[in-house]
């Protein structure tokens, strides 16, 4: 096996990809992980619903620890971006932005999705600390507090309604997009105030402590916590499409629910790339499950 030939390649070193790498490393397979360190989990400063981390843990910490753990088992990493993937004669090859070509027997796509976050001053340090993205992850964090829902149109309005499970003090800042009258009526029924104005900056204290927003019209709106719902998230399934992998209309990848293998033999997918609740814990399970079945396939191929 040449230095650029592997038993498995993993594209994307987020939570799912790293969990798969660790499992495959413990099976002692030759594995390459290709990642450009621009994944969604890098943005979250604090996950609070993961077993074993009662005080929360950042995505950056999980990725750093996961990479160190995988490296201990001989997993190779390269900082690069895959631009092309193809399957010929039972082998899978990828080409990267840096001009390199790698080949493997199996492939795991864990390229994830990326949230659309407009260029709003001071927003990044607050993410996962005092401005949240996922209600299933962090709805509890805003319990009984005044939340400013920073969002766009229908997506933002729906998220504002979802958050009424935890708090009845919500203001929806409609940064862009339109809201239908029927939706406005629902917001009014829940006493959710709506402000149609672009957001210029997040007002913070100690860099990451959310205090409100400053609008482009000069108005300042105070709040205890923030939530974002801008819609238009990018599903990174371009490589899957190149390989002929079946996708849903929203571009998420379809997999076998038991094995996580796609409709293309020897191509697996895991994490937010596939259709599920977009939770760190589920991504971990996906990665582990995919790795188990990749191992089974590699063993079968050797028989």
Image: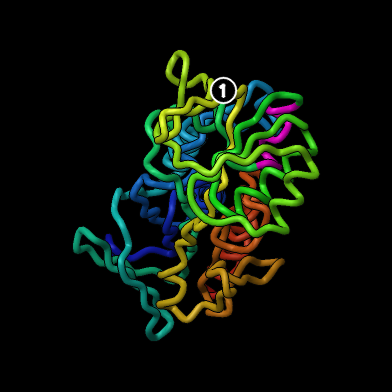
Mark 1 lies on residue: 222
Closer to us: 133 or 164: 164
Q: In the image, is residue 6 above or below residue 163? A: below
Asked whether residue 28 appears in the rendered view, the answer is no
Q: Which residue sits furthest left? A: 99
Bin the neighbour count of mark 1 within 10 Å (Cα to Cα): few under 14, some 14-19, many 20 and up: some
Residue 130's image quarter?
A: top right
Query: Count the marks: how many?
Result: 1
Q: In the image, is residue 223 above or below residue 295? A: above
Q: In the image, is residue 50 above or below residue 270? A: above
Residue 142's image quarter?
A: top right
The stretch drawn in magenta includes residue 175: no
Please give the range of residues in magenta.
135-143
Which quadrant of the figure contains the C terminus? bottom right
For the point 56% across and 22% down, the residue is 222
For the point 67% across and 37% down, the residue is 193
- Say whether residue 110 is left or right of residue 97: right
- Say whether residue 166 is left or right of residue 101: right
Residue 40 pos. (x, y %): 47, 46
């Amino acid at each position: 096996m040449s230095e650029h030939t592997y038993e498995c390649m993993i594209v994307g070193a987020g939570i799912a990809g790293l969990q798969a790498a660790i499992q495959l490393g413990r099976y002692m397979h030759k594995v390459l992980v290709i990642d450009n360190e621009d994944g969604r989990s890098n943005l979250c400063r604090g996950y609070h619903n993961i077993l074993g981390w009662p005080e929360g843990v950042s995505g950056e910490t999980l990725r750093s620890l996961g990479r160190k753990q995988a490296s201990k088992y001989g997993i190779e990493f390269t900082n690069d971006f895959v631009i092309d993937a193809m399957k010929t004669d039972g082998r899978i090859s990828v080409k990267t932005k840096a001009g390199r070509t790698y080949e493997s027997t199996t492939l795991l796509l864990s390229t994830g999705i990326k949230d659309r976050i407009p260029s709003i001053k001071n927003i990044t340090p607050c993410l996962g600390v005092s401005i949240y993205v996922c209600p299933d992850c962090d709805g509890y964090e805003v319990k009984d507090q005044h939340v400013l829902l920073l969002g766009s149109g229908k997506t933002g309005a729906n998220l504002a309604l979802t958050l009424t499970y935890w708090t009845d003090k919500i203001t929806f800042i409609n940064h862009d997009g339109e809201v239908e009258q029927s939706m406005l009526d629902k917001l009014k029924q829940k006493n959710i105030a709506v402000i149609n104005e672009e957001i210029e900056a997040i007002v913070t204290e100690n860099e990451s402590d959310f205090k409100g927003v400053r609008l482009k019209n000069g108005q300042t709106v105070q709040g205890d916590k923030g939530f974002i719902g801008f819609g238009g998230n990018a599903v990174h399934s371009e490589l899957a499409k190149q390989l002929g992998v079946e996708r849903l209309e929203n571009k998420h990848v379809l997999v076998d629910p038991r094995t996580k293998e796609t409709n293309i033999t020897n191509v697996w997918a895991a994490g937010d790339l596939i259709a599920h609740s977009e939770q760190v814990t589920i991504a971990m399970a996906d990665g582990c499950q995919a790795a188990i079945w990749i191992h089974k396939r590699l063993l079968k191929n050797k028989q």
